[in-house]
């Protein structure tokens, strides 16, 4: 759709920067880990009508989906694997 095309065009520079820096920073993996650790709270938040938490979880998942789309379309499987095997250096 047209909206999706506009979103891709508006975020391409951010995505390219993340593609370059993520193997050193591990930011994408960290975002995914935080999202997964907080998913247990989603059901409780829905029951309590905590719309702020649900909105934050939705946005995090949206960002993850957008980034993965760019990563998958622009990288080989081996390059993509590097982005998920970050190990913090001592």
Image (cartoon, rainbow, N blue to C red):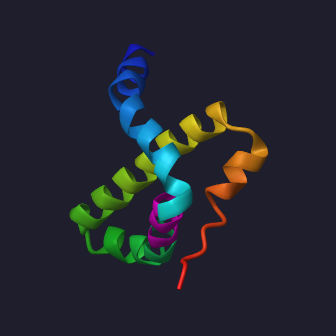
- Residue 84, percent from left and from top: 64, 61
- Characterize the magenta stretch by its predominant secondary structure: helix
- Residue 63, percent from left and from top: 42, 47
Is 79 situated above or below 42? Answer: above
* Residue at image coords 67%, 56%: 82
The answer to which image quadrant residue 46 occupies is bottom left
In the current view of this chain or complex, which residue is farthest to the front?
90
* Residue at image coords 45%, 63%: 31
In the image, residue 78 lies in the stretch drawn in magenta? no
Q: Left or right? Give the position of 81 relative to 49.
A: right
Q: Left or right? Give the position of 59 relative to 85.
A: left
- Residue 32, percent from left and from top: 51, 63
In the current view of this chain or complex, which residue is farthest to the bottom?
90
Is 89 situated above or below 21? Answer: below
The quadrant of the rendering that contains the N terminus is top left
Is 54 situated above or below 19? Answer: below
* Residue at image coords 53%, 86%: 90
Pick the residue in front: 21 or 59.
21
Pick the residue in front: 88 or 77.
88
- Residue 30, percent from left and from top: 48, 68
Pick the residue in front: 60 or 89.
89
Please state the extent of the stretch shown in magenta in the rendering.
26-34
Is 79 situated above or below 41? Answer: above
The answer to which image quadrant residue 44 occupies is bottom left
């Amino acid at each position: 759709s047209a909206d999706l095309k506009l979103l891709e065009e508006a975020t391409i520079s951010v995505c390219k920067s993340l593609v370059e820096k993520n193997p050193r920073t591990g930011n994408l993996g960290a975002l995914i880990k935080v999202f997964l650790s907080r998913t247990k709270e989603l059901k409780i938040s829905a029951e309590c009508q905590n719309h702020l938490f649900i909105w934050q979880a939705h946005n995090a998942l949206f960002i993850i989906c957008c980034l993965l789309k760019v990563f998958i379309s622009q990288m080989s499987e081996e390059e993509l694997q590097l982005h998920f095997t970050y190990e913090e250096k001592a």
